[in-house]
């Protein structure tokens, strides 16, 4: 199966499978964030630290070209490290990931206020979305989806299991962390509340906070979106694997009527 990116020396060339929802010639946000996460995960593995927070700033649209990643350790502490990964299109920085890594203490206290929550349906018990919804983007056509609540084609909160089936990078297996990050970018799509024929909605950033590492290739997104003033909105989501929740997601949303977007482009 063709991968999302193919190594090209020290670069990673995006294939047509990386195409996003607003243009088939522009990268899906999931591809962008997952590629930067690959660097963070490798540094975390080498140091023995755990990934606790990932914050992505997506500054510029990215075409289907070859990209470089540049990694820098901003703070090297005994208990916490801060890592920065920059995604480069030539000499232009198009996105950045800032990651917090923490050392493991080996033991966690019991939460006396923890509530017992019924287990979610497994992905095998979910239902795939309609075929037309799966065509949201070229990238999305390579993501397996199993809905257990709500619907992708209807506005409102929803819950869906997702798994990227194509390799992110040719010759490499998709890790649970990469699956979690690429799934998280779909939070606003899972919880979309507008008619996409009338509105565009983008998230110029996304943050994930982890209480433990994900342990499965299937990731459950349970998401909801709120709209504020002047085109602003906020999507929040909980990510789970078969063992239960492991991370929270926040996306700052920007809404714009399609007529306004078309007027600006003309």
Image (tube, rainbow, N blue to C red):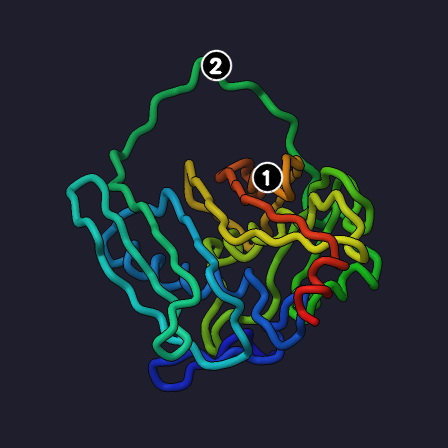
Residue situated in front as seen by the camera: 111 or 71: 71
**Which SS class for mark 2?**
loop
Q: Position of residue 160 (x, y in %)?
A: 69, 46
* Residue underneath mark 2: 113
Does 54 sit above or below residue 226?
A: below
* Quarter of the figure with residue 212: top left
Q: Exactly how many numbered labels are in the figure?
A: 2
Q: Mark 1 points at which residue?
A: 234
- Res. 128 in view: no
Residue toward you, 112 or 59: 59
User: Crowding at label 2, few (<14), some or many (≥20) Cα neighbours within 10 Å?
Assistant: few
Q: Where is residue 184 in the image (x, y as percent from the top left)?
A: 56, 50
Say above or below: 185 vs 71.
above
Instruction: Name the quadrant of the C terminus.
Output: bottom right
In the rendered view of the protein, which quadrant contains the N terminus? bottom right
Mark 1, other Cα within 10 Å: few <14 / some 14–19 / many ≥20: some
Which mark, residue 66?
none
Q: Do the residues labelled 1 and 2 touch (CB within 8 Å)?
A: no
Instruction: Residue 132 in the image: state x and y as whole percent.
Output: 83, 63
Left or right for 139, reference 98: right
**Farthest bottom residue in view:** 9
Residue at position x 27%, y 39% in the image: 104
Please tell me whether mark 1 or mark 2 is closer to you in this view.
1
Decide if residue 11 is on the left or right side of residue 241: left
Q: Residue at (57%, 51%) from the top-left corner?
A: 203
Q: Which quadrant of the view contains residue 202?
A: bottom right
């Amino acid at each position: 199966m063709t991968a999302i990116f193919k190594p090209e020396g020290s670069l990673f060339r995006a294939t047509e499978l990386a195409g996003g929802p607003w243009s088939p010639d522009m990268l899906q946000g999931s591809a962008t964030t997952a590629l930067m996460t690959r660097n963070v995960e490798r540094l975390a593995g080498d140091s023995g630290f755990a990934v606790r927070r990932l914050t992505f700033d997506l500054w510029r649209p990215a075409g289907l070209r070859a990209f470089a990643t540049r990694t820098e350790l901003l703070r090297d502490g005994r208990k916490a490290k801060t890592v920065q990964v920059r995604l480069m299109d030539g000499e232009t920085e198009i996105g950045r990931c800032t990651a917090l890594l923490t050392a493991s203490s080996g033991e966690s206290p019991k939460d006396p206020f923890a509530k017992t929550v019924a287990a979610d349906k497994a992905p095998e018990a979910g239902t795939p979305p309609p075929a037309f919804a799966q065509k949201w983007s070229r990238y999305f056509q390579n993501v397996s989806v199993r809905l257990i609540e709500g619907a992708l084609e209807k506005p409102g909160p929803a819950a869906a299991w997702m798994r990227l089936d194509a390799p992110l990078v040719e010759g490499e297996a998709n890790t649970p962390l990469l699956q979690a990050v690429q799934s998280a970018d779909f939070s606003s799509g899972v919880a979309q509340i507008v008619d996409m024929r009338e509105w565009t909605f983008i998230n110029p950033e996304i943050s994930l906070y982890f209480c433990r590492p994900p342990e499965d290739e299937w990731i459950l997104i349970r998401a909801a979106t709120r709209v504020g003033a002047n085109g602003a909105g906020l999507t929040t989501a909980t990510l789970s694997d078969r063992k239960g929740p492991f991370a929270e997601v926040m996306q700052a949303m920007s809404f714009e009527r399609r007529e306004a977007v078309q007027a600006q482009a003309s």
